[in-house]
Amino acid sequence: MFLPVADMTFSRYASAGALLNSGTVVLYGPSYDGDAYDPVAGTWSATAPIPSPRFNGHLFALPDGDALLVGGDPTDARTVRYVSETRSWAWGPALHASRRFEQAAALADGRILVAGGFGADAAPTNSAEIYDPATGAFTATGSMPRPRAGGSAELLADGRVLIAGGIDATGNADPCATVYAPTTGAFTAGGCFAAATHGRFMPAAARLHDGRVIVLGGQTYFLGSTRLAPDADVYDPATNRWTQRLAAARFEHALTTLDDGRVLAIGGVDDWNSPIETTEIFDPVLDAFRVGPPLIVPRYGHTATALPGGRVLVAGGRISASEWTTSAEVFLSDALFSADFE
């Protein structure tokens, strides 16, 4: 079930969120404002103003308790750092290249991989770089086999990173993945989606407790047509292969792994560009989806942050083509056992 919590201090769409070491959830922008959520009190409070608007960037919690916002701007390579002690934002180190719709993931050792994305020339790039919190700087690493933007990046159990989906240099959604190995700094070819012509732009992804990765939804581009992907693909690192599962078509949604190992797909828009309230639960034991509890507020372009105790904080997003929302709600995993959703 979803329960309402206090509204944010500002309406948000395509913002970025992170759970800090302190247990606070901080949200970036996308305009000049930030919000901090206290899960114990269930309240929001405004942070200091943000130095630069960013849409669809990635916000990562850092080992020292702060957070770093990377990407989200195709012409400005600077990052933005959240200083938790003062609840303020400041410029961080610059990326080697400006990026939007980049693929980014935190590595097992606390470093951050940032790859691809659209640059200043509006074309996707294949370059990649690594942020090291110990040095506070970015260094270049190996390049992806092909340029891509708008894909997903998920840390695998063995420390590698799976990058899947996204638009390639031809303007089509790339149907094949690539895998980054931090030990060598190299990308290698990954398996292709079950339907060889079926790529995904802006899918949502999550790693299962058994080490597999599920990639769901997003837009597909094929022979000049665009539609929403009406399924999910599951990647097995042991075989480097994908298998397909039926799932509802959704775009600008969220996907979150719960404490019990199941995965929650939340909201998004449908084929008619209408916000949807539906959720789905993927059970890795049954290897299938079932209907989950509905959102209180249909929304897309929202954040979804996993909290301790199987909770998920869902905040902001669009509730219509012209309206952003300040509303937020929390998913309680215990409600999955309710007869209403069996």
Image: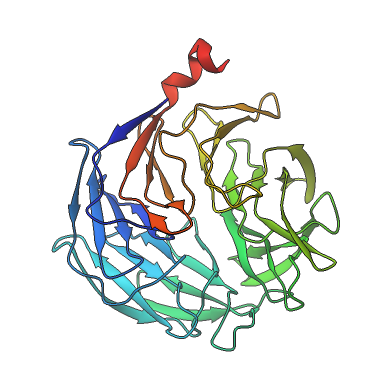
Q: Is residue 129 above or below residue 157?
A: below
Q: Nearer the viewer, residue 282 or 157?
A: 282
- Residue at x 35%, y 67% (from the top left corner): 68
Q: Is residue 65 visible?
A: no
Quadrant of the drawing holding the N terminus: top left
- Toward the left, the furthest residue is 86
- Residue at x 64%, y 65% (from the top left corner): 180
At which x and y percent is residue 105?
Answer: 51, 60
At which x and y percent is residue 208?
Answer: 60, 39
Q: Count how many numbered circles sit on residues in the image.
A: 0
At which x and y percent is residue 289?
Answer: 66, 30
- Residue at x 58%, y 54% (from the top left corner): 154
Q: Is residue 147 visible?
A: yes
Q: Nearer the viewer, residue 11 or 41?
A: 11
Quadrant of the drawing holding the C terminus: top right
User: Which color scheme does this rendered protein use?
Assistant: rainbow
Q: Nearer the viewer, residue 23 or 46?
A: 46
Question: Is 31 left or right of 302, judged from the image as shown?
Answer: left
Question: Is 325 left or right of 82, judged from the image as shown?
Answer: right
- Toward the top, the furthest residue is 339
Question: Is 264 left or right of 270, judged from the image as shown?
Answer: left
Q: Is residue 305 above or below residue 259?
A: below
At which x and y percent is residue 259?
Answer: 46, 31
